[in-house]
Amino acid sequence: MSSARLVPLALAAVLAAAGCGAAQTQTGTNTDAGITIFNTDPENPLVPGNTTEAGGSRVIDALFTGLVEYRAEDAQPVNAMAEKIETEDSKLFTVTIKKGWTFHDGSPVTAKSYVDAWNWTAYGPNATQGASFFSQIEGYAEVHPKDPDGPDGPQEAPKPATDKMSGLKVVDDHTFTITLSEAFSVFPVTIGYEVFAPLPEAFFKDQKAFEAKPIGNGPFKFVSRNVGTDIKLTRFDDFKGDKPKFKDLTLKVYQSRESAYADLVANNLDFMEELPPNALAGQKYETDLGDRVVQRETLNMQAIAFPFYLKPYDNVDLRRAISMAINREEITQRIFEGTRKPADGWVHPLMKGYQKGQCGEYCTFNPQKAKESFAKSGYTGEIVLLSNTDGGHQEWAEAVANSIKNTLGVEARFVPSTSFGEFRQKVNAHEMTGMYRAGWIADYPSIENWLTPLYRTGSSSNDGLYSNPAFDAKLAEADKAPSEDQAIKLYLEAERIMAPDMPVIPLWTQNTIAGKSNRLKVANLHPFRKLDLDSVEVVG
Amino acid sequence: MVPVFIGTTFLIYALVWAVPGDPFEGKCGERDCPESYVSAMRDKFNLDDPLVVQYGKYLGNLLQGDFGLTSAGLSVGERIAATFPVTLKLALVALLIEAVIGITAGVVSGLRNRGFLDSLVLVSTLFLISIPVFVTGYVVQLVFGLQLGLISPTVTSPTIGNLIVPGFVLASLSMAYVARLSRTGIAENKRADYVRTALAKGLPQKRVVGVHMLRNSLIPVITFLGTDLGVFLGGAIVTEGIFNVPGVGGLVFRSILTKDGAMVTGVVTVLVLVYLLMTLLVDLLYAVLDPRIRYD
């Protein structure tokens, strides 16, 4: 009996090993397997609107499915729970959701589930971390009034008169409308973020119980949480979207990335999306993991920002000179061994509508021009580069400072600051004493996200206080564009308007290096630096 | 003990919340946290009150057994209750390894003064003392866990059996000290009058070494072991990090990184208590070992 059964199995194995087609792959996949992936302990209660950090996001992402999801291949938004999202003027959006979807507790997902969840997250007194994502919806200011003397002051923000945004209206069980306070053509792209997930009735009845056992509508449902050790999820069999090809998902909390890496090498851990520095040093991961390395370009960009409030960095010739004095090619090759790619503009290459060379000569290493521009600026003093060093930034920051020093023949110094929190605080308080590191990870995959939040006058992350009225006007025009194509064209124009000003020096985009165990046949990285759960196949 | 307790907790409380940088800065990634979030958090931790009032409120809750909540809404008390037993297990395993191997090696080498075994112990302890714990940890993990595949490179679940390897690593340094301390004690007492008397009485060698000599030689060793247990209970951040042991050390370390002040103060307060208790215990043990101290 047993030997007879062995033959087809062995045959299948041979065929699979020879890489013959999809039919064999199917037989070799164990769809009831469980996998374990790396996680850090969630820093906040497991509620979508209150989760903005990685440890919680990995859980929320598996538990919830929003209106829109970002495709793993090219980061483009595709409808998930949305049947369609329609608009004529980029201001009023009509959302139709798919029928028949339920939460893990069996209650149906309706238009109301979305509207209630969004209202709850935006409501000021609920003090969620994700509230600001709703600021474009009409009526946000009413439910989230500003604190009159800032968060540190003794006065409390006035209690909002209403807890419902006027811009959200339920039409029927499966339709609702969103009115924005200003036309915003890329709005449908932004709502793939987890804070836009729906919430079930159960959440509003008993929030504490929900936090202990979250109920979502996504491909996985919650099983148990052992704080500080692991979170266990299992496949939700009534899920209406693409079902995962494995059953149980354990998100294991590690004390350090180094220990997780040891487990990964020993095949005790199935996936880890960012290897620790000790594995990256000297490309050690290649010998450790071999063909288990998973690598792809993800949506983050490293840059150097200028404090426009500090002399001499408000001098455009100096900014251009510094940018042209940085040898991006050499630094990416020498320090990052080719895992980063020199940037040639402010928009990430993976974005729809990305155009090559938007920054032009200003982002190309050119010692001659750099020197000319530097002479023109009339500045001769010291140039200071600031960065936190807890994220492995020291090496490249020193290399950049050296590159500037050698090219311009001027004193250029790297000044480290120890923690990310302290660094961010100084950036936010506009207390920088030199130019500084500015990383950006896209919130949503749109060309707009690489421009508006960072460079528009008064934007949330425009920490350097750059301002160019012509650029602002072009962005405003793009926001109001009736179609995506037109919007992209206008955003690109805006980028070109900004280029000669060099408000921020784009340095490079990043490849993320992940690793998988030999149990996983397929495990792909998502452009948002996470495991693409849909892709995972476990060896049978 | 009470003034020590109040003094240390106040110091910790003041220091933790005085760390430069707003505790809620950098909590929401590269962007700012919404103002409503920051002000609700400041409210929750009474950060708008003067320091003494803040501390008073904290101490008031603490005396009722309430350690408070972290900014993630987790109960600090529950987290301590979950991680402390793990650390306790690890500490006991390490202490046991350290005591058994250390004392045995010390006694053996002390008795065979200047023999081959003595030199062996001296050289190997010198070797252990000179390697930092993180080197021992990574080497053990790499060689036995990854290359030979004899052990799991990290601890899958914190049972006593699984904690033997991390316990060994943790104990390695102190083990060397214990061996040297007991060696000196034995070597000194070997020529003591009471030992000669005991031998002259015709007592068996086993009893002379095991009861008469060891008891007197162990006093400095016990002091060392006692304080060491306190140190182990304070969390072995490095060892826990390498072997992924979900203990107190990692908890404190991560709480400091995420600026979770409530957690840091809570855990450190417990550690202060533990340390005070350990010191008391060591003092009591002296009396058991040395009658002279008992009668004083």
Image (cartoon, coloured by chain):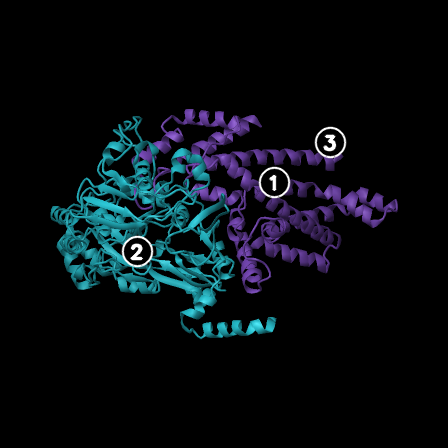
Chain colours: A cyan, B purple
Estimate the spatial distance between the alpha carbons at disc 2 and disc 1, rounded to whole Å: 50 Å
Q: Is residue A366 left or right of residue B17?
A: left
Which quadrant, please, contains the N terminus of chain A?
Answer: bottom right
Q: Are marks 2 and 3 on the same chain?
A: no
Measuring from the top left, give residue A347's x and y in whole percent. Answer: 23, 56
Front one among B264 and A307 = B264
Mark 2 residue type: Leu
Q: Is residue A73 above or below residue A429?
A: below
Q: Which residue is mark 3?
A: B294
The residue to which callout 1 is attached is B227
Residue at x 58% of width, y 61% of height: B144
Closer to the camera: disc 3 or disc 1?
Answer: 1
Which of the 4 quarters of the picture holds residue A403?
Answer: bottom left
Distance (Cα) linking label 3 and label 1: 21 Å
The numbered mark 2 sits on a residue in which chain? A
Secondary structure state at the residue bearing disc 1:
helix
Q: Which residue is mark 2?
A: A299
Picture quadrant of residue B215: top right
Q: CA distance from mark 2 to mark 3?
A: 70 Å
Q: Position of residue A299 (x, y in %)?
A: 30, 56
Residue B3 visible from this viewpoint: yes
Q: Are marks 3 and 1 in contact (CB under 8 Å)?
A: no
